[in-house]
Image: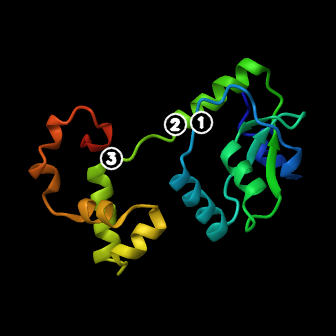
Amino acid sequence: MIDLSDRYASPLSNITWVDVNRLNANDYNPNHVYGPEMKLLELSILKHGWIQPILITANYEIIDGFHRATLAKTSLKIPAFVPCCIMDLDEPQRMLLTVRINRAKGQHIALKMHELLEKLVKDHGYSEEEIGVQIGASKDEVKLLLQDNVFTKLKIRDHIYSKAFLPK
């Protein structure tokens, strides 16, 4: 267990910038990011910079951040040097950490997305088009999420196949 009272015990205290071409994928990552989400991730990095380091081993194996590293290798817009935290973990610890990080990201709940988009439009003056660009959603997705009473009308509680539509 890390002693959180010692700020230097945290991997974030030791970020180093590494040439992305030195990094190697692990062979156990169960996560996959599809094309549209990769474009959204690229937009996020370009718009806000690096807000999360890539977690790596001393041998430059990626523990977490494979898709960010992939973008840095393939995008002509993202610089090739990436922020990394070197972690001293054995393979089982790395595998468990990878899964925990990916599972902890959670899922978006459609009702909460409706409230968030509604606030962006009504309180902050965002257009539906700008919201679509910023969150990587189609025009139809944005319109659906902004519809009043859509969740009642569609009887969302009856659609057990979609966790995204479960109200909290």
Q: At x 52% / y 33%, what residue is drawn? A: 103
**For the residue labelled by badge 2, is the local secondary structure a helix, a strand or a loop?**
helix
**For the residue labelled by badge 3, is the local secondary structure a helix, a strand or a loop?**
loop
Q: Quadrant of residue 62?
A: top right
Let me know if residue 16 appears in the view: no
Q: Position of residue 84 (x, y in %)?
A: 80, 48
Residue that carries the numbered disc 3 in the rendered image: 109
Q: At x 33% / y 62%, what residue is drawn? A: 116
**Which quarter of the figure is the C terminus placed in?**
top left
In the displayed structure image, the side of residue 116 where residue 38 appears, left or right: right
Gap in Å between the C-alphas at discs 2 and 1? 5 Å
Q: Nearer the viewer, residue 106 or 147?
A: 147
Residue that carries the numbered disc 2 in the rendered image: 104
- Hey, which residue is sitting farthest top in the picture? 92
In the displayed structure image, the side of residue 57 where residue 108 appears, left or right: left
Up-down: is 9 above or below 115? above
Residue that carries the numbered disc 1 in the rendered image: 101
Badge 3 amino acid: Ile
Up-down: is 102 above or below 82? above
**Which quarter of the figure is the N terminus placed in?**
top right
Q: Position of residue 90 (x, y in %)?
A: 79, 21
Q: At x 31% / y 60%, what residue is drawn? A: 141
Gap in Å between the C-alphas at discs 3 and 2? 14 Å
Mark 2: few/some/many CA within 10 Å (<14, 14-19, 20+)? few
Q: Position of residue 144 (x, y in %)?
A: 24, 60
**For the residue labelled by badge 1, is the local secondary structure a helix, a strand or a loop?**
helix
Q: How many marks?
A: 3
Q: Nearer the viewer, residue 113 or 72?
A: 72
